[in-house]
Amino acid sequence: MARVIVVGSGIAGLTTALSAAAHHEVVLVTKSTLGQSNTRYAQGGIAGVMFAEDSVEAHIIDTLAAGAGLCDEEAVRVLCTEGPARIRELVAFGVEFDRTDGEFARGREAAHSYPRVLHAGGDATGARIEAALVARIRESRAAILEDTFLVDLVVEDGRVAGALLRFADGEDRFMPADAVVLATGGAGQLFPYTTNPAVATGDGAAAALRAGARLADLEFYQFHPTALTTAERFLVSEAVRGEGAVLRNAAGERFLAAVHPDAELAPRDVVARGIAAEMAAQGGLPVVLDATMLGASFLANRFPVIDQAVRASGIDWSRQYVPVSPAAHYWMGGVVTDLDGRTTLPGLYAVGEVARTGVHGANRLASNSLLEGAVFGARAARALDTDDVSAWPAPPRPVVTIARNPVSDAPPFSRAELQRVLWDAAGLLRDGAGLQHAAAILDAWSTAPLPTDSIRSLEDRNLLVLGRELVLAALARTESVGAHARSDSPAGVPATAKFREVAPAC
Ligand code: SIN
């Protein structure tokens, strides 16, 4: 029996760990408490073909269209074909998806040609899935290490030999393993405004990069159009627009119909940029979400989590508009994998948001992320059963991008400064000059090693290395595509779309 370390406890990590625990010695490592992950905060739901009138082909077409031509079609086919079985498995694990007249309730979200998004507890889908999987993993044979941080992967003889972990007692110790599965999620903390929890600092992706695994598509960061403009940037699900809510500018006018024929239900990148342009045009003021037509009892029943957050910020959204603006939400890029989660580094697997499976291309379709975690988590677990790591081809030598052009007047490094630089240069709208300047600042910060004495400083080290790679990837892609919009690209994105908020409204 092999020892497998799974790092991360969202849907992807838990799915992998649960399946793998049947045949292997599994150690599930999580930097916080079990259940503290991006999955827990997912609201809208999980997309999958569960109704006779829908089709896998239609889900594939929608996913490819949202991905703006850059998805790997084979990976999309796997996702959409195997998704329904994984959803049924979640039901068997105890997830009670909401029903209407005995049938699964059909949620509509942007850029889906069919209302195929299942939800649970109204808008508590991620939390319900997380709770069911956490209950199952606690019953399994997997060992669980909470408050344990992945410092680095350890590579010996060209393959992953285990992980250096910082344990809850503050000590760093090497844990040997036959395979390591990264399920560490995204890195929303690269930006000052994010829907992600504080744990989303890209630890797995950064460790994979340092270990020599290949990463790709890092320029594609998805900004969710509608986060509540409180300090915490609470997500206001796309499903609210799917139920009929609309967006208005400061003058109270709807503005998205002029941007895209599907208006509020256009692909997420289009809506986010449309909002940013409107905000820039109105001096940085947030736009507002008008859900008043849905009524108090519908809002409270269908969206209990958002209802609570919006009301806690002092807004009665059955009568008042909700100020919203875009916030970093999901990283389409990540550690390159094949269809079974294998990375380019023998013995290393990646599943969920940390992975670049190719299913999202330049822009992820709403509610495909939980599905990806379930589908590819299960596939990686199956691969663990059969893989012979010694037969895994050794990777090419890692490409180390060295500091090229550091500026001498970079401000001192801090996480807040890093986030500001990335938001300004590599946020919703980019251009060559801004990216060059950001790269020079990031190069300057990268010339001296950051401390590693605390978890916070280890996270900062990870954010810096990933922020720099994101900027370099954005510089290298000179055309606008999907979530990567350049004002200096021939595709032409309105130069006004950049915004800096002036007045958080609540
Ligand atoms: C949302 O509920 O709007 C987010 C869903 C997703 O990120 O797919």
Image (cartoon, rainbow, N blue to C red):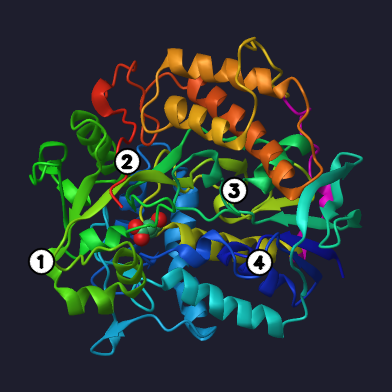
Residue 214 x, y percent position in the rendering: 67, 36
Callout 2 secondary element: helix
Q: Which mark is residue 269?
A: 2
Residue 212 visible in this rendered orientation of the protein: no
Residue type beneath disc 2: Asp
Whether 315 is among the magenta residues is: no
The N terminus, quarter of image = bottom right
Kindly report the distance in space between the C-alpha atoms of the residues bearing marks 4 and 2: 30 Å
Callout 4: helix, strand or loop? helix
Q: CA distance from mark 3 to mark 4?
A: 13 Å
| Residue 133 point in image, percent of width and height | 59, 77
Which residue bears the numbered disc 3? Answer: 355
Which of marks 2 and 4 precedes in the sequence? 4
Q: Residue furthest bottom?
A: 102
Alpha carbons under labels 1 and 2: distance apart: 25 Å
Compare marks 2 and 3 and give the one earlier in the sequence.
Answer: 2
Determine which residue is flagged by label 1. 293
Of badges 1 and 2, the one in the foreground is 1
- Amino acid beneath label 3: Ala
**Looking at the image, is mark 1 or mark 4 earlier in the sequence?**
4
**Residue ID for mark 4:** 16
Q: Who is closer to the viewer here, 241 or 23?
A: 241
Of labels 3 and 4, earlier in sequence is 4
- Nearer to us of marks 1 and 4 is 1
